[in-house]
DNA sequence: TGGGTTTGCATCAATTTGATACAAACTTAT
DNA sequence: ATAAGTTTGTATCAAATTGATGCAAACCCA
């Protein structure tokens, strides 16, 4: 079994982290009319997990989440919000960590910091799918997008974390204009509606959706889009944040 | 300076707690048409703080919050909900703890567990004011209710925690029937309306409020109340949870 | 018995939401 | 060129919800 230098470096960082506290990120993206979540797949063990990490003693939990997000997606300035902290005593089977490290050639003793109890602060992020290059971490073969309806079994309580994140996102969509962050800078009304329909998982009436969005007064009409499609070209919108 | 046995016992418990994690409770009550928050006032130092505590290694954070709530109010089965986790690196002036302990005759070394960085998981509780006997803890002279508009300066970031709790409560009031928990088991429509007006901080039209509440279909009319007042006696309601 | 009060509810107006329709603007096929 | 087939933008009307006002009922007190 090979031992890896980066992993040793990571394990040695234990004392720099705030004990007992971890951060997990549910990174939402939107592509081809599907709501996606970014997942990591561990090397060797092939277990799936949310991108997560620990909090340095000299950073806030928000900063830690931002950092983890950046490490996983290569993007900064991302819409990121804390939504729940998961503090069950037994959040699932911690053997995964032992097994993962073992597969890398590190046999952790029972008292190792990585095998202690951690609570997890959950953050969800809304990113522009097209701007993101999923980046595996040192434990992962690959990071990839998964349709929200086709999430595999994840380690620990990560499936529950995703459920809660989605629930929160749906709630937020109602009274905060948060969805735009999942689209590129400019978008058509159709794209926006598809996004809403996907997140809320229900059909909306086109005319009424348009009326409601326009009435908010924050959509700026950029131009007609020449799509090359055989129909009237739609307007392209951008958010007018300073309105 | 006297040293106190209970405080020594508390300090010795350090190893039983999950490091870095604390819980703070914003306990809301409703009395004489005012929204109240339960605060503790420390002995000697006279600093004000939210009731809070630490999480035992063998309990969940929810259980810890429930326990702390019970210790402070003597009530179990309380509506309790986590609303935010406060994870700033510097959540305020940690000297209060050093000073408090010093005032009790304990000089803590810098590395003492109580002086380390803690994140705080915020819970808010909605309690029936009449059922609660505020109980000071070993550091506090007294626990008492404070009008939400007259909160004194609190230690650390506790003022911010209250603000966030109130914000969450207002949000929740809109789409969850959560307010009832602040009233006694039976109540009049007027009391319910006063509660809403106080939390939302705005006047509501009586007729419309009644219409809306009744339309929810969860209020059970118990009887007419003979208030002894010189007017038509109001109905008394109870929540029909199983509806 | 009448005055003062609050309660419960009806009523109507104003606003918001749901549903449908239709002309405009584009491409493609003839 | 023109007709057919799309989707888009918006108007329109019905239905539902919310805002505002009024009034009779039920109580106490004098």
Image (cartoon, coloured by chain):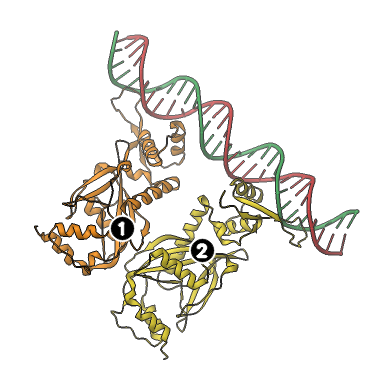
Chain colours: A orange, B yellow, C green, D red
Name of the residue lying farthest toward the bottom: B1
Q: Residue at x 42, y 34 (%)?
A: A203
Q: CA distance from mark 1 to mark 2?
A: 27 Å
Instruction: Report the mark closest to the observer, 1 or 2.
Output: 1
Drawn side of residue B133 relative to residue A6, left or right: right
Q: Quadrant of residue A56?
A: bottom left
Camera-side residue: A82 or D1? A82
Q: Residue A174 or A39: which is nearer the viewer?
A: A39
Q: Residue furthest left?
A: A2
Residue B76 left/right relative to B2: right
Secondary-structure class at tag 1: loop
Q: Chain of mark 2?
A: B
B2 in relation to A100, above or below: below
Rendered view: B85 above or below A163: below
- The residue beneath circle 2 is B78
Percent position of residue D8, x then y: 38, 29
- Viewer-proximal residue, D8 or B217? B217
| Residue B192 image offset from top left, x and y in percent | 62, 56
Q: Are marks 1 and 2 in contact (CB under 8 Å)?
A: no
Residue A92 shows which numbered tag? 1
Residue B140 on image: x %, y %:
47, 79
- Which residue is rendered at x = 43% and y = 38% of the image? A213
In the rendered image, which quarter is residue B225 located in?
Answer: bottom right
Q: Would you say residue A162 is visible in this rendering?
A: yes
Q: Secondary structure at mark 2?
A: loop
Q: Is residue A29 above or below residue B153?
A: above
Q: Residues within 10 Å of mark 2 (few under 14, many from 20)?
A: some
Residue at point 66%, 56% (across, down): B190
Q: Is residue B171 left or right of residue A159?
A: right
- Please rate how many residues cluster around mark 1, counting C-alpha atoms within 10 Å: few if below 14, some from 14 to 19, many from 20: few
Tag of residue B170: none
């Amino acid at each position: 079994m090979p031992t890896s230098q980066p992993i040793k470096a990571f394990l040695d960082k234990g004392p720099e982290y705030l004990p007992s506290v971890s951060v997990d990120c549910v990174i939402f993206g939107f592509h081809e009319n599907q709501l996606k979540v970014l997942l990591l797949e561990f090397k060797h063990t092939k277990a799936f997990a949310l991108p997560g990490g620990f909090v340095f003693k000299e950073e806030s939990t928000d900063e830690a989440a931002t950092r983890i997000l950046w490490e996983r997606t290569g993007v900064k300035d991302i819409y990121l919000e804390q939504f729940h902290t998961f503090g069950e005593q037994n959040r699932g089977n911690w053997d995964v960590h032992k097994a993962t490290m073992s597969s890398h050639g590190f046999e952790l003793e029972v008292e190792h910091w990585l095998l202690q109890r951690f609570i997890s602060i959950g953050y969800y992020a809304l990113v522009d799918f097209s701007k993101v290059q999923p980046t595996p971490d040192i434990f992962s073969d690959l990071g990839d997008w998964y349709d929200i309806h086709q999430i595999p079994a994840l380690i620990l309580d990560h499936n529950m974390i995703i459920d809660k994140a989605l629930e929160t996102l749906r709630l937020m969509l109602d009274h905060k204009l948060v969805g735009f962050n999942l689209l590129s800078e400019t978008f058509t009304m159709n794209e926006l509606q598809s996004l809403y329909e996907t997140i809320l998982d229900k059909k909306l009436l086109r005319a009424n959706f348009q009326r409601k969005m326009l009435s908010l007064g924050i959509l700026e009409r950029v131009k007609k889009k020449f799509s090359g499609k055989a129909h009237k070209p739609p307007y392209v919108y951008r958010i007018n944040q300073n309105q």
